[in-house]
Image: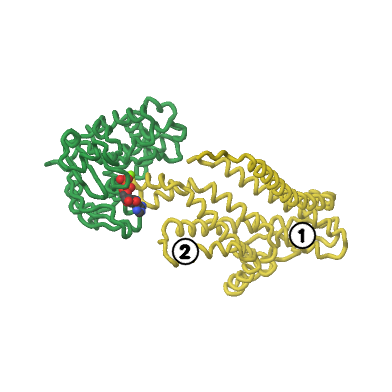
Chain colours: A green, B yellow
Amino acid sequence: MANKAFSIEDFNLWYGTDQALYQINLDIPKHEITAVIGPSGCGKSTLLKTLNRMTETIPSVQTSGSIEYDGEDIFAKKKMVEELRTRVGMVFQKPNPFPKSIFENVAYGPKIHGIKKKQVLNEVVEKSLKGAAIWDEVHDRLNQNAFGLSGGQQQRVCIARCLAIEPDVILMDEPTSALDPISTLKIEELIKELKKDYTIIIVTHNMQQAARISDNTVFMLNGEMVEFSDTDQLFSNPKDKRTEDYITGRFG
Amino acid sequence: MNDKVNYSHIKGRVMKNAVVKWIFIMATSVALIFLALLIGRVLSQGVGYLSIDFLKNYPAPYIEEAGLFAGIMGSLAMISITAPVSMILGVCTALYLEEYARDNKFTRFIRVNVQNLAGVPSIVFGLLGLTFFVYLFEMGYTLIAGALTMSLLVLPIIVVAAQEAIRSVPSEIREASIGMGATKWQTIWRIVLPAAIPGILTGSILAFSRAIGETAPLIIVGAATAIYSIPDSLFSKYTVMPMQIYSWTARPQEEWQYVAAAGIIVLLIILLCMNAIAVWIRNKFQKRF
Ligand SMILES: Nc1ncnc2c1ncn2[C@@H]1O[C@H](COP(=O)(O)OP(=O)(O)O)[C@@H](O)[C@H]1O
Ligand SMILES: [Mg+2]
């Protein structure tokens, strides 16, 4: 793959003495949707959080191996982690808006990166909310607290908040698992829409979801990457016996 | 199996439930009755001696002329130094302990001992203040020495309240901020502190109410009992409301007890106001998570 966003080599991760990731080797392509599937506890979230170094907020975490983003080592000493997290944004499992207005939620990213002009902020907020397909629902109540929104709306505001820092990659950790089917559908539509402009890596425990929206799928088991291939191929013609067992529902 | 639920037990449990409820009601009543007696006595003795002059006058040898003005102004001056000093120190300490300090034996030791300090008798802080502020830093028996001593006294309470408030900010919204490339400090300043402020302020105001009623440490660091001026600099002599009240109760004539009761009413009203502010702040800034 010529155009790769992340290139992961021989990557291992430990929480204290418990190893959570074993020898991961993976190249994640740009401008495609890559789904990560696997049973609960297999290390999907850990792998995802490693990509923008969120795992470093846990003091006990140790790693080995290398991860390159855009051809550069993300762990390099001179690299500032804040810069990486600006280029690689994240949407979490549970909608987690700040206890602020909808406007302030979305303007937060631009503000911390130094944008002060009200007019610029207004534009970024509108653009991001439109990008997250929530503008029509909230444009007349931007000053209301984001907690007043439904779960699905909150999650789309969180996606807008992420878009507002203009990342290249969006990491999503089971973004629909706390939502009802209709909100889930809306967010899936949105993710497919976002693919034009962003590289998306989405963790999901929902295989149908992976099959519906992704271009590539990674199957993980017990901290190992078992299989990585084109989504259609992985679901119709898995190479590994364990993948086949999982997608046919024989375990997990 | 064919066991039926044994309904005869239910009666016993319902009985127990009622008995326990009554025990709690009685415990609460005891507290309320004593509180009512106390307030009733203070009011009946003191109300007659309350007047505008009582609020405006300096201490005097004659009951009709005696007033609490020096004490009220002294207490306010003291709180206006103690509040910022202890809150800045307290919130910074709490931020360090909660956000920056690594979790090891040493920091755990500090955490536990901050909590213990909150329970140390106030007179111990008086001795500390006497040793450090009055003698070592040569401040003498001045307002600043008293105010700093009081700051030490309330500091542990504020640290513990602030720690709890900071800890109760959900980790999800910290992660959201860090995950967008915010630095730790930006996250603390823009997300954690605003969310923790109601808790910090209510805890602090309750701590200040305690400080306003304290005498023991101030006797040690040399607050005056009778003084005929209000503090006009950090190095003024000063008195505070409870000191004046204390000195009145020590006089032999019975009527001075009533003057003291009037002083207690003023003190209680000020405390009530501070508590009301604490509740108001909590309600106003309460955020849902
Ligand atoms: N903060 C943590 N501290 C210690 N162990 C953790 C932590 N987070 C996850 N783990 C462990 O790492 C393994 C992988 O977890 P995770 O990446 O959350 O799995 P998944 O997202 O696939 O359910 C699990 O065994 C889990 O218990
Ligand atoms: Mg997970």
What chain does mark 1 sit on? Answer: B
Residue B191 bears which disc, if any?
none
B23 or B228, nearer to the observer:
B23
**Residue A21 picture location, percent across and down:** 26, 52
What chain does mark 2 sit on? Answer: B
Toward the left, the furthest residue is A2
Image-based side of A47 in relation to B140, left or right: left
Counting other residues with Cα less than 10 Å from the Cα at mark 1, is it few (<14), some (14-19), or many (20 or more)? many
Instruction: List the residue tagged with mark 2.
Output: B108
- Please, what is the three-letter code of the amino acid marked with disc 2? Arg
Query: Which part of the image, by quadrant, shows the C terminus of chain A?
Result: top left
Q: Quadrant of residue B123?
A: bottom right
A224 or B98, nearer to the observer:
A224
B217 or A215, nearer to the observer:
A215
Count every numbered label the image shows and give the total. Answer: 2
Identify the element where label 1 is drawn.
helix
> Which residue is at a point 12% across and 41% down the rendered structure image?
A1
Instruction: List the residue tagged with mark 1.
Output: B245
A240 or B153, nearer to the observer:
A240
Counting other residues with Cα less than 10 Å from the Cα at mark 2, is it few (<14), some (14-19), or many (20 or more)? some
- Please, what is the three-letter code of the amino acid marked with disc 1? Ile
Image-based side of B83 in relation to A174, left or right: right
> Which residue is at a point 43% across and 26% down the rendered structure image?
A140
Asked if badge 2 and badge 1 are on a common chain, one would say yes
Identify the element where label 2 is drawn.
helix
Image-based side of A108 in relation to B204, left or right: left
Of callouts 2 and 1, the N-terminal one: 2
**Residue B22 picture location, percent across and down:** 72, 46
> Which residue is at a point 52% across and 38% down the rendered structure image?
B2
Toward the front, the furthest residue is B2
Ligand 1 within 8 Å of the CB at mark 2: no
Q: Is residue A213 above or below residue A201?
A: above
